[in-house]
Amino acid sequence: MERRYYDRYEEFRVNGKMKILPFLKIPKKSTDIQVVYKANSRLDIISFDYYNNPNMGWLILQANPQFGGLEFDIPTGTVLTVPFPLQKSLEDYEKAVIRYRNTSGI
């Protein structure tokens, strides 16, 4: 069953305090989709188009680390990777979180 909301902050709340949320690279997959970012594009719209969920723009940014965490830094005409399918991409992200936790001690 697909989750409508995914709390990517959950694993970074420790003893009631928020830890720094690191950039976690997710692996590319042959099923990922390439999308041209247009002048009127927004990640919430792209997220909704491919995931039927507008809240996954952060995941699209994870797959495009060259833009950091800011959608507004994406130039018009850029080809973006949309991690696909969503469930597998979230599982990849969760594995990256576990690796990070195991090496950082949080």
Image: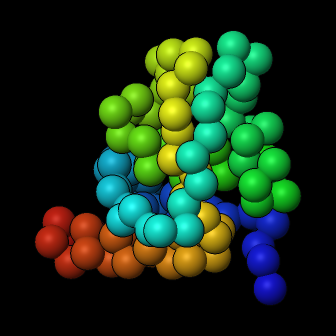
Q: Nearer the viewer, residue 87 or 8?
A: 87
Residue 31 at x, y = what percent? 55, 68
Indicate the position of residue 84 as horizontal and vertical percent values.
60, 65
Which of the pair 10/62 is nearer the observer? 62
Residue visible at 21% across and 78% down? 102
Left or right position of 92 against 7: left
Question: What residue is shown at x 40% (from left), y 62% (from top)?
Answer: 28
- Horizontal side of 80 relative to 28 (left or right) equals right
Which residue is found at the position 38% from the left and 78% from the top?
A: 95
Confirm whether residue 15 shows in the render. Answer: no
Closer-to-camera residue (65/8) = 65
The C terminus, quarter of image: bottom left
In the image, taking residue 40 as reference, residue 75 lies left or right, namely left
**Res. 27 visible in picture:** yes
Q: On the rendered structure, is 106 left or right of 63? A: left
Q: Which residue is at the front of the view, 38 or 43?
A: 38
Task: Say which residue appears at 72% left-offset and 48% top-offset.
Answer: 47
Picture layout, residue 104 above or below residue 61? below
Q: Quadrant of the N terminus?
A: bottom right
Q: Is residue 54 above or below residue 37?
A: below
Q: How many marks?
A: 0
